[in-house]
Amino acid sequence: MTNSAAAPLPSQVKKTQSRSERRARKMRTANAAERAEQKVNAELTPDANLAKGKTSNAFADKKNIMWVLLSGAMALTFIVMLFLPDTGMGGGIISTYSAMLWCGFFGAALWRYRTANGWAGFAYGSVIGLVLQFISQII
């Protein structure tokens, strides 16, 4: 008697999934695929960072000193050009913008390296660049 009222219901009932359940399932499959890819990369390259499961991303790494050094070198280049005679950077609005921009980049990179707000560092650096440009006009 399979059609009686006491017969159990089939266990394969399709349940509609909510958006968060679908997103969670999609994230689990994406994470599994990423772990599999990292495992393949770890087997292919004997690099210590990849073997630990860390991938090197220079743009996302806030503790990468290279951005601080590069932006500082560019800021220093433009600041030195402000004080040297006959470099074409003495007077003009471009010299103000370049000093503010590169000092701002240096400030942002330095603040992010110190795990502080990069926008505040950009603002402080831009103000310092503007002051240095005014000082270069006086000297």
Image (cartoon, grey):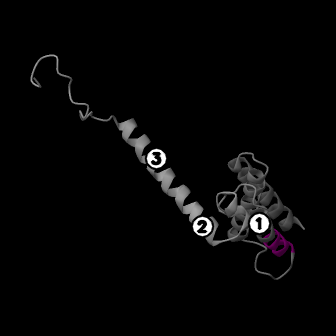
- Give the CA separation, mark 2 to mark 3: 21 Å
| Residue with the mark numbered 1 | 66
Q: Residue at x 41, y 47 (%)?
A: 26
**Does 9 appear above or below 99?**
above
Q: Quadrant of the image for the C terminus?
A: bottom right
Q: Which residues are magenta?
A: 76-83
Q: Residue at x 81, y 57 (%)?
A: 131
Marks 2 and 3: which is nearer the front?
A: 2
| Residue with the mark numbered 2 | 41
Q: Residue 18 at what x, y percent from top left?
A: 33, 34
The type of residue carrying mark 2 is Asn
Per the image, is 80 magenta? yes
- Give the CA separation, mark 1 to mark 3: 33 Å
Q: Residue 6 at what x, y percent from top left?
A: 16, 16
Q: Residue 116 at what x, y percent from top left?
A: 75, 45
Q: How many marks?
A: 3
Of the numbered discs 2 and 1, the one sitting upstream in the chain is 2
**Does 80 appear above or below 48?**
below
Per the image, is 12 magenta? no
Q: Quadrant of the image for the N terminus?
A: top left
The type of residue carrying mark 3 is Met
Secondary structure state at the residue bearing disc 3:
helix
Q: Quadrant of residue 38?
A: bottom right
Marks 1 and 3: which is nearer the front?
A: 3
- Please tell me which residue lies in front, 32 or 22: 32
Of the numbered discs 2 and 3, the one sitting upstream in the chain is 3
The type of residue carrying mark 1 is Met
Secondary structure state at the residue bearing disc 1:
helix
